[in-house]
Amino acid sequence: MLENWVVMPTCLPLVLRRCHTCASERFRADGKFRVNANHKRIDAWLLVLCTACGATAKLTVLERVNVRSVRPELLDRMHDNDPALAAELLQDPVVRRRNHVALDWHDAWRLDTGGTPHLDHEVSDISVRFAAPIPVRPVRLIAEGRGLSRAGVERLIAEGKLVSAARLSGKLSGDFTFLLKR
């Protein structure tokens, strides 16, 4: 029986970056932007707040870009402080690399299995889809989706009762499928 699971974000992830005020390493983004124009050039930043002291830091989105080269829809979304745009930009590897930040997805996602686990089937073919590139350990997903312990899932892998074309050790952030034999 084919089952479809979806890993969905529940909120924006925390931004891992050192705070210059209190040396904390976690910031939260709430979707606020700052846009500054100087003649024909424009700068734009995503504002993030330190979780410890509340200090504001800026993540560069646009830097000294010609105003005419920016899509008007993007500029409107920044002026409207669109939280969906903040989520898109945080997941953009170019923005993360430019600002030297990483994301902490702890408690910012959930697994939707489409209902209760169906443990009565002898063979289950399960497809896991990621709604956003959230790095998660497949063993953790399978344990949570099937109501098993992580050690139990690893035992199923060792016994050959749980197989996948994807590597089940480490973290994945892309879609994969696995076969569970009971």
Image (spheres, grey):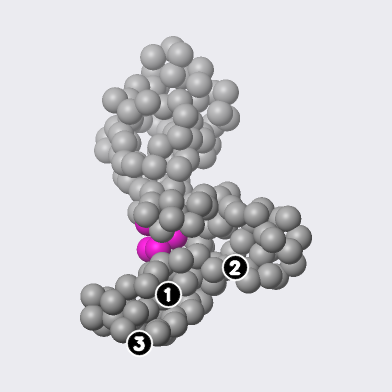
Q: Is residue 142 left or right of residue 14?
A: left
Q: Amino acid at mark 1?
A: Ala
Label 2 residue SS: strand
Q: Are marks 1 and 3 in contact (CB under 8 Å)?
A: no
Name the N-terminal-most of marks 2 and 3. Answer: 3
Q: State whether residue 140 is above or below residue 30.
A: above
The span from disc 2 to disc 3 (Cα, nearest Å) is 25 Å
Amino acid type of disc 2? Ala
| Picture residue at 39% right of the left edge, 18% below the top | 161
Q: 25 or 182: nearer the eye?
A: 25
Screen quadrant of the N terminus: top left
**Quadrant of the frame with the C terminus:** top left
Q: Tell me if residue 164 comes above or below residue 14 in the rendering.
A: above
Q: Amino acid at mark 3?
A: His
Q: Position of residue 74 (x, y in %)?
A: 31, 77
Q: Which residues are magenta?
A: 88-92
- Other residues around mark 1 within 10 Å, as few (<14) / some (14–19) / many (≥20): many
